[in-house]
């Protein structure tokens, strides 16, 4: 395998050097590789909203690191009158970043945790503003490492779960799976390795991947541009299909399991993910194909009872009506939700870095997420 793919580069810099955050310009992939220097939260907010960086975990990590780079380069604490001012500034920057995109919950969860860390450090006796900013920068940097570690563990859990579920249905007797996925959930959507694509990578590493099918993922084509790029980069056996070809592929008996990522999982297991995911779940159910979600626990929102409460981002009509800046659709009204919600009853399993989320009851019931998280 060639170089490891990455979409986020952070360098803390030695004493006297500037810290640096670079984001891979994903809108230009796969044709061009360009890195953008991100100076701070404002640039990160724009990069997230405009999809330079996308994917729920990557959004959270990039946002957090933009706060870190700004703190480190603006004085590493010396810019604040006291610890309270440092903590208030950090919270204000994080709250602003949370407004960039509404559906993925990882950023809100990270922002709450980092604000809490800043406040508690600021309240410690003898604390300094430099101590507060340093602790927050450390925590932001740790997000990169922790995400990769979580994805590798998730990959192992997911590979075993997909194989077992497919074989329980009399599929994949050879021990090798044909897996369909949607959107991009790989190294470009996370710190590295990926969630659903991490499961596919883990299957491949174990010699248990027969073939991966990636859906193009209209209208933004994260599957055609990014997942296809990752699969080719890693040399995995793979085929790109139109989103609308997935049911036909299943009907031909060419899919043993489906695995997708998530942007927000409600307390009952209802899962918001890239638009088109729900259609794949319905098709998989019709063909008795196990449908899995792979996501870190930081994608779970236990405050929402069900998926109907998840805010769904609406994106610009031009993403649907235009191709490479050129109008290709008639002048017509457009509905362009970026995500849909797959009901828990269509999900065979939710794979996390802590293993599979248990169900509250029999197959098809809600998932017992709150109890499981608290245990
Ligand atoms: O609009 P995007 O590209 O940010 O949407 C990404 C997805 O929906 C992914 O499937 C999800 O964030 C999981 S990424 C590991």
Image (cartoon, rainbow, N blue to C red):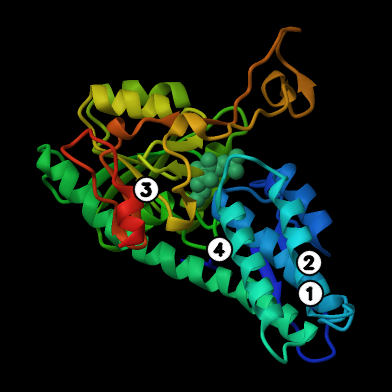
Instruction: From the image, tell me which residue sits under label 4.
Output: 191
Name the quadrant of the C terminus: bottom left
The residue carrying pointer 2 sits among few (fewer than 14), some (14 to 19) or many (20 or more) residues within 10 Å by Cα, namely: some
Q: Position of residue 307 (x, y in %)?
A: 45, 33
The mark that comes first in sequence, 3 or 1, is 1
Marks 4 & 1, CB-CB < 8 Å contact: no
Is 344 on the left-hand or right-hand side of 3? Answer: left
Residue placed under numbered mark 3 in the picture: 237
Which mark's residue is nearer the viewer, 4 or 2? 2
- At mark 1, the secondary structure is helix
Which of the pair 59/175 is nearer the observer?
59
Q: Nearer the viewer, mark 4 or mark 3?
A: 4
Write down the residue under mark 2. 88
Spatial separation of the CA atoms under disc 4 and disc 1: 31 Å
Mark 4 touching mark 2, by CB under 8 A?
A: no
The count of marks equals 4
Label 2 sits on a secondary structure element that is helix
Marks 1 and 2: in contact by CB < 8 Å?
yes
């Amino acid at each position: 395998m060639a170089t490891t793919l990455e979409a986020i580069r952070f360098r803390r810099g030695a004493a006297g050097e500037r810290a640096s955050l670079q984001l891979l310009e994903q809108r230009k992939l796969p044709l061009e590789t360009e890195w953008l220097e991100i100076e701070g939260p404002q640039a990160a907010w724009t990069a997230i909203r405009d999809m330079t960086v996308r994917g729920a975990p990557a959004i959270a990590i990039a946002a957090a690191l933009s706060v870190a780079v700004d703190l480190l380069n603006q004085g590493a604490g010396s810019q604040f009158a006291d610890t309270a001012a440092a903590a208030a500034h950090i919270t204000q920057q994080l709250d602003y970043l949370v407004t960039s995109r509404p559906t993925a919950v990882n950023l809100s969860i990270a922002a709450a945790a980092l604000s809490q860390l800043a406040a508690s450090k600021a309240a410690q006796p003898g604390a300094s503003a430099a101590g507060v900013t340093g602790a927050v920068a450390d925590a932001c940097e740790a997000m990169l490492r922790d995400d990769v570690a979580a994805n590798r563990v998730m990959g192992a859990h997911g590979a075993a779960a997909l194989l077992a579920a497919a074989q329980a249905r009399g599929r994949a007797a050879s021990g090798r799976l044909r897996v369909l996925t949607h959107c991009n959930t790989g190294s470009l959507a996370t710190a590295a390795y990926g969630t659903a694509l991490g499961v596919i990578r883990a299957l491949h590493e174990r010699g248990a991947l027969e073939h991966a099918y990636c859906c193009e993922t209209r209208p933004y084509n994260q599957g055609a541009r990014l997942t296809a790029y990752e699969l080719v980069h890693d040399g995995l056996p793979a085929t790109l299909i139109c989103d609308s070809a997935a049911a036909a592929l299943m009907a031909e008996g060419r899919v043993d399991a489906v695995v997708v990522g998530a942007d927000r999982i409600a307390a009952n297991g209802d899962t918001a993910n890239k638009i088109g995911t729900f259609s794949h779940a319905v098709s998989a159910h019709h063909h008795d194909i196990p449908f899995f979600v792979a996501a870190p626990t930081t994608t779970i929102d236990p405050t929402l009872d069900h998926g109907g409460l998840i805010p769904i981002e609406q994106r610009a009509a031009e993403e649907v009506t235009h191709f490479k800046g050129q109008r290709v659709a008639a002048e017509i009204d457009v509905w362009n939700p970026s995500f849909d919600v797959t009901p828990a009853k269509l999900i065979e399993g939710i794979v996390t870095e802590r293993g599979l989320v248990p169900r509250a009851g029999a197959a098809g019931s809600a998932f017992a997420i709150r109890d499981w998280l608290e245990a």
